[in-house]
Image (cartoon, helix red, strand yellow):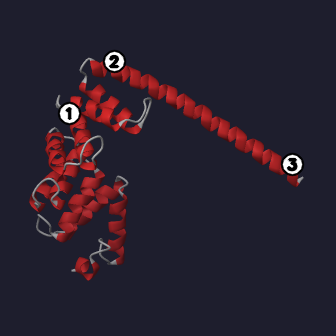
Amino acid sequence: MKRRWVIVAIASMALIGAGILVRTERNNRRFAKWAAEYRILAERGDAKSQWALGAMYEYGRGVPKDCVEALRWYRKSAEQGDAKGEYALALMYHEGKGLPQDDSEAARWCRKGAEHGNVLAQDALGIMYRRGEGVPPDDVEAVRWYRKSAEQGYPQAQYDLGYMYYYGHGVPRDRVEAYDLFQQAAAHGDDDAKQALECYRKGISIDPGAGLRGLQ
């Protein structure tokens, strides 16, 4: 009986593995079809398709993974003023993918994406001002960009803005406003905000590295 169960288990695993392979192959064909369609439009100058094709090259979906080729298509998209292309190009500069790492260029392209309303770029630009990456450190500017992103409903920016209110960085300290922003972010699934609310309930700092300073 034991032997029979082992045989059944092996057979089941083989069937599951075969199913995964079939689904993977099906997904690969679908991605390849999308990549071909995006390429036609991208070569005609469509900025959104250029960004999409760049993303497929960056992550190896439907085409071989190739950061240099991804960079090429992101740049074409960004140079036409597409906000997603601008933010994607900023990330490539920030992470040094397909070219030397350069936070000054990352900040330049991130700003373009942020000014064109991309919530990810707005939050990222806030982070760059907070950390002084590619731009001079400036908490007031960080707050300004966090707010723009948060007002569009981006949960990470809501948390980031809440954090600034919690400690009074770039704005007068306001724990009530911070709590409200954490609640908004948590309602959208942000884990940092959920942790912050839990810390509130326990009466401890939201920042694990803050120690007693966070309770002041």
Q: Indicate the quadrant containing the C terminus: top left, top right, bottom left or bottom right.
A: bottom left
Q: How many marks?
A: 3
Under circle 3, the secondary element is helix
Is 199 situated left or right of 149 in this image? right
Residue 195 position within the rendered picture, expressed as x and y whole percent measured from the top left: 36, 66
Marks 3 and 2, how far apart at CA: 54 Å
Q: Position of residue 156 (x, y in %)?
A: 29, 54
| Tag 1: amino acid | Ala
At which x and y percent is residue 58? 36, 37
**Up/down of 100 relative to 186, above or below:** above
How far apart are labels 3 and 1 at the CA level?
Answer: 61 Å
Residue 121 shows which numbered tag? none
| Residue that numbered label 3 is attached to | 4
- Residue 40, label in figure: 2
Which residue is at the front of the view, 50 or 187? 50
Name the amino acid, label 2: Ile
* Number of residues whose C-alpha sits closer than 10 Å to that of mark 2, classed few (under 14), some (14–19) or many (20 or more): some
Residue 78 numbered tag: 1
- Classify residue 187 as left or right of residue 31: left
Do callouts 1 and 2 mark residues in contact (Cβ within 8 Å)?
no
Amino acid type, callout 3:
Arg
| First of labels 3, 1 by sequence position | 3
Local crowd size for mark 1, using a 10 Å CA cut-off: few (<14), some (14–19), many (≥20): many
